[in-house]
Amino acid sequence: MARKKKKPVAAAAQNGQGTVFISEADQYLFAQGTHYDIYKKLGAHLSEENGKKGMMFAVWAPHARAVHVVGSFNDWDENRHPMEKLGAGGIYRTFIPGVGVGEMYKFLITAADGRKLYKADPFANYAELRPGTASVTTDITHLKWTDEKWMTQRGEKDYRKEPLAIYECHIGSWMKHPDSEDGFYNYREFADRIVEYLKELKYTHVELMGIAEHPFDGSWGYQVTGYYAPTSRYGTPEDFAYLVNKLHRNKIGVILDWVPAHFPRDAHGLADFDGEALFEHPDPRLGEHPDWGTKIFHYGKTEVKNFLIANALFWIKEFHVDGLRVDAVASMLYLDYGKQDGQWVANKFGGNKNLEAIEFFKHFNSVIRGTFPGVLTIAEESTAWPLVTGSLEDGGLHFSFKWNMGWMHDFCEYMKLDPYFRKNNHYAMTFAMSYNNAENYILPLSHDEVVHLKCSMVNKMPGYQTDKYANLRVGYTYMFGHSGKKLLFMGQEFGQEREWSEARELDWFLLENKLNKGMQEYVKELLAMYRKYPCLYEIDNDWAGFEWVNADDAERSTYSFIRKSSEGNGKLLFVLNMTPVARKDYCVGVPRKKKYKLVLNSDEERFGGSGNEIAEGIMATAQECDNKPYRITFDLPANTAVVFAF
């Protein structure tokens, strides 16, 4: 009698999206690193099998001797719910009738050496509030969205030619409830407050720190244990979807910080997940950051690459996010990043480039940008690595934008100087334009610049209090006039004087002070100007959009330049005085004989300035200046930025 052919191993499940199978094809694609919906198969999903409703659990643990599901639904019994290994790839699954939404659970993994490890679900969509470490069953298949118009328009945008002004924000410390232990606003409460604030200031996007689940508040969300779960600190996945939806309904984009560089060693997390190195490289010289005390993802392992790229797609598809700012890119690209001799291993060519990470980024960006052309991928990359935003055809990594960390460093170091010494460092402020066309840049003044004894932005500035605010107004004007998109960390828009701490809210009480209210009003004016004039954003990585008038006036520490649009009209002239010395009858060369209309004067009283007035319109005269055929002349106040339209 012929033996009956064995049926292919498959796990049937049903949730709100219909019947789901963990088939041999699923296992094959995951092993190949190209199963971009793997998060719909692994993790915990509502299902119905053999007429019974319950929960399907699945996990990847190829080195395990056995895997069980333990949770609040079985009194954490180690033996009641064993999982079945589906194939050689190491995926385990089981179906437990009667389990619904809101149950805590973990995977109990018996390692090859007999150790028992209690692990949170790497694909969980919700987690217990820290210090608890369990995953929580949920269902994200019925999130409510009413942002169709935004999503359609997003796909039609080329943000290289659009205004991009990003407000970097940490929800837990932006504003707090005064009467609760942590003081955290729920995602929905935060939405109601942040939307009005961003609309008033005229930001285009918000970048949210620390959204993926993480155990330690002090990591600011950069040491992740739950890559597929919005942190429960601020509510449920439904609450987070409400936040994104409301921002979209109010024409504000959402960028998430995303951390594929490393993960923490916490016992419930990804480290040594099934008793051996699984998500990390097994060689500590390749799999550990000695300075950070964290694990490095194994970018050469197909399943790990799949885990990360599917995670990026998860946030984009399931939560409609508009961009991912990729953290610590340099640490991924260089094998010797933060390491001493003997702590790293060269690549096959004997160099320090991480060839597997390079391939990962090309794969990541080709999938994200190819599938969702309106979604931004932004590299926080601190070196001169070439073609970070270059095309794949040219050998680039194909990010949408790169943070200009060099500009940020030069800007902060220059602005901290006593004005007397600025003339000796004059070209620190012009250097960034010499390489501006190398990448598509974002100019960031981020959270990293206002912590760890670096001072807040306003307290980096020299002089007495009024001088500090005047300096910062000039500095921000330079930032908004300079080529590149814009990013400013929360609180710095109104002159937060203390360094940022994740443990307390911003010092909103400062807005009762004239200088702080004036600073906030000034940033609002800068943002309005930025969005009004295409010359400030339309041609950002080409000399066609920028022209120095005088970049060499080191003795007086002044700068002047013109921003231009593709149409050739609507130009803006920026004049910046970086000293506390007023310049009477200051002359600026201009290209045309016409009236130059005053757009912005940072010394106005409403901004906290001294109130020195400049004529609303100045007629150019036919006298050569700054190698231009015409000039305008006016009294340039101390520590002042002036912008003219022509």
Image: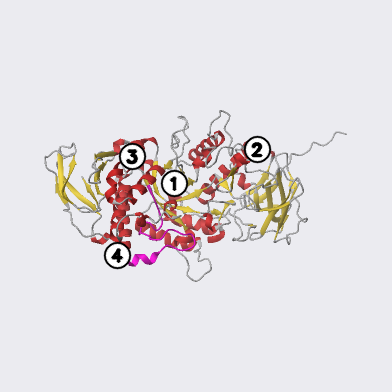
Whole-angstrom CA distance, mark 1 to mark 4, is 42 Å
**Can residue 511 be found in the magenta stretch?**
yes
| Relative image position of residue 252 (x, y in whole percent) | 41, 53
Asked if marks 1 and 2 touch (Cβ < 8 Å), the reply is no
In this view, the mark in front (1 or 4):
4
Nearer to the camera, 298 or 440: 298
Magenta residues? 486-514
Whole-angstrom CA distance, mark 2 to mark 4, is 61 Å
| Relative image position of residue 495 (x, y in whole percent) | 35, 59
Whole-angstrom CA distance, mark 3 to mark 4, is 34 Å
What is the three-letter code of the residue carrying label 3?
Phe
The residue at the point 24 percent across, 56 percent down is 603
Residue 516, compared with residue 10, is above or below; it is: below
What is the three-letter code of the residue carrying label 4?
Lys
Q: Quadrant of the C terminus?
A: top left
Whole-angstrom CA distance, mark 2 to mark 3, is 47 Å
Whole-angstrom CA distance, mark 1 to mark 3, is 39 Å
Circle on res. 31: 2
**Can residue 363 be found in the magenta stretch?**
no
Circle on res. 152: 1
Whole-angstrom CA distance, mark 1 to mark 2, is 34 Å
In this view, the mark in front (2 or 3):
3
Residue 100, compared with residue 5, is above or below; it is: below
Mark earlier in primary sequence (2, 4): 2
Q: Quadrant of the N terminus?
A: top right
* Residue 235 in view here: no
The residue at the point 50 percent across, 38 percent down is 365
The residue at the point 39 percent across, 58 percent down is 491
Residue 464, compared with residue 162, is above or below; it is: below
